[in-house]
Image (spheres, rainbow, N blue to C red):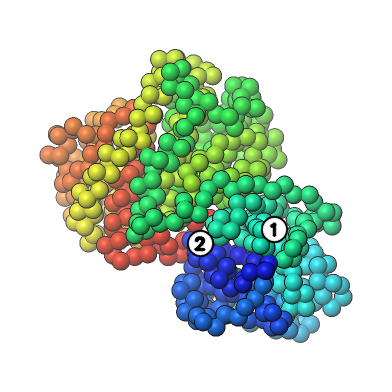
Amino acid sequence: MCGIVGYTGPRDAGPILLEGLRRLEYRGYDSAGIALVTESGELFVEKKAGKLANLQTAIADRTPNAAIGLAHTRWATHGKPSERNAHPHCDCGKKIYLVHNGIIENYKELKADLEKIGHKFSSETDTEVLAHLIEEYKKQVPLKEAVWRTLAHVQGTYGLAIIDRSEPEKIFVARNGSPLVLGVADDGYIIASDIAPIVRYTNQVIYLEDGEMAEVTPCSFQVTNFKRKKVEKEISKIDWTLEEAEKKGYDHFMLKEIIEQPESMQNAIRGRLVAKEGMAKLGGLRDVADHLREMKRLVIVSCGTSYYAGLVGKYMFEEYAGIRTEIEYASEFRYRKPILDKETVVLAISQSGETADTLAAIREAKNKGAMTLGIVNVVGSTIARETDAGVYNHAGPEIGVASTKAFTSQLSILALFTLFLGRQRDMSFVMGKRIAEELSKVPEQMKKVFKDSQHIKRISKKYSGFSDFLYLGRKYNYPIAMEGALKIKEIAYVHAEGYPFGEMKHGPIALIDENFPTVAIATRDSVYEKTLSGIQESKARGGKVVAVATAGDKSIAKLVDDVIYIPKTLEMLTPLLSVIPLQIFAYYSAVQKGLDVDRPRNLAKSVTVE
């Protein structure tokens, strides 16, 4: 889950690498480091624990001019965050430096063997073993072959970039299970773990596949695979701009991305919603439409916030498309024996398209003969390339670690997908038209929720002294209760439990007292009366209740302590609106504590390790 950036070309590498790290800091911020090969062939290396600013301060005004270099921002897996464990790591001779994203599973055995023949290690990381292996093999063969032999002996995942003082004009990069992108600019090449550092310089990129290595010089690149065969690569075009990845005057990326949700949702449904016909047109599914018509079972695999989107999708698919649907944590999917067949379709949901657990799940599904689909935000990502078909979010870059606009974009596409599948089956024209018309209204309804932001901010301040919350919802809003609890955990470091209302009395109600408030999603829908009963149970035990309710519902204000209203919409679309107050509530809860909203502790945006 670390951030990698490298550059080789005629420009000064230092500023490019530091700017790249700034754009990758959401991928890891435990420590940062840089290695440059100067014009005289000397190596300049600096590493600092903590955030990128510590590294920038340490090397201010003393970064040498260099045409080639690597940099890294770390999210710790092996070894605590420290300067000692920061990347880049080097060999005994301090000639080979490398940066790595992933996990080397057999590093202990390899390290023990290397120590027996005299290698000295200076860190606790799994990564350092790679530098020493390359050093050892290089005693017998050229550098490129030494890298190949090293990769043949390691087990695990890696996105890897390597420089060697003895061949100072080259960067070697390799991938197995952890993303790497090569940006092709007019003035050199930029290597990165995602496209964020690249868009400033070029929109032309090459995506490395698992089992490929690239040898990159200031003027050229060559890609080969594990069989040492040359691979011809197509150049892809990045579909978002540098401006989209900036804060645009907002205090935090997260706030910007919350406010962007009407636009990102509109982008998700634009050109796909045929309201007059009550249909959805999904070009990415055109070639598999006949197979989907015959599908008997749908299995959704995802993690974190994307899992909660999938759970909303399960309700949609079953109620409106009549498809038996299961939702699985991707991280557990392949560790049991999933029963799949040709009439089962597996749908992966991932913002980044690089989530390691989700990628492993779809590979398992493909191995068992199931068709795989994807809902991803990043064009050209691994999941997008490896699934049989899919739909892009088109939400634009999401930089804040806690997902907001990607989540509502996923819900929008799941609603479109429901319409698409339902109209293939028993959904009537009238129902299809109603869903389409209501879906088209949601972006404007979202804007109405934002008008209540200051009210939500005041409520968050009122409850800022509480350290525990219970989030409750029913049916479509049960996943939103879990998502709301996740948000306040992620960025405000507040303990919160997300539960279905009906389960409260089977255990969690024991926690309710005057110090354990409840956030209740109580919209006027098919389970409204049941929801009110659950609220009464909380109030009877002295608990404070904040309700998210439907506009015009004056009676609920008499029952609860605080209420936030959202516009009325079709029940299946309510999550698109009910989640927004919970995002805003979590955001202001964190801001009032002075926390780093965009980079919460211990988290990274794209989880590319298992």
Q: Amino acid at mark 1?
A: Arg
Residue under the image location 22 percent in, 50 percent down: 454
Residue under the image location 77 percent in, 74 percent down: 167
Q: Is residue 366 left or right of residue 484?
A: right
Q: Earlier in the sequence, mark 2 or mark 1?
A: 2
Which of these two is toward me, 147 or 200?
A: 200
Percent position (x, y) of residue 44? 63, 81
Instruction: Identify residue for label 2.
Output: 23
Q: Amino acid at mark 2?
A: Arg
Instruction: Identify residue for label 1.
Output: 175
Q: Is residue 237 left or right of residue 324?
A: right
Work out whether residue 109 can be spotted.
no
Percent position (x, y) of residue 7? 65, 66
Which of these two is toward me, 164 or 111?
A: 164
Which of these two is toward me, 427 or 70?
A: 70
Query: How dense is the environment of label 1, judged by Cα within 10 Å: few (below 14), some, or many (20 and up)?
Result: many
Asked if 237 appears above or below 588 in the picture, the reply is above
Residue under the image location 45 percent in, 45 percent down: 406
Which of these two is toward me, 360 or 587?
A: 587
User: What element does badge 2 sit on?
Assistant: helix
Residue under the image location 31 percent in, 35 percent down: 445
Percent position (x, y) of residue 70? 63, 70
Query: How dense is the environment of label 2, judged by Cα within 10 Å: few (below 14), some, or many (20 and up)?
Result: many
Asked if 185 appears above or below 45 in the picture, the reply is above
Percent position (x, y) of residue 597? 37, 60
Quarter occupied by the C terminus: bottom right
Which residue, as the protein is rendered here, is positioned at the far left?
558
**Dot in front, 2 or 1:** 2
User: What element does badge 1 sit on?
Assistant: strand
Q: Is residue 101 left or right of residue 552?
A: right
Q: In 3D space, how far apart are the residues under numbered discs 2 and 1 (Cα atoms)?
A: 21 Å
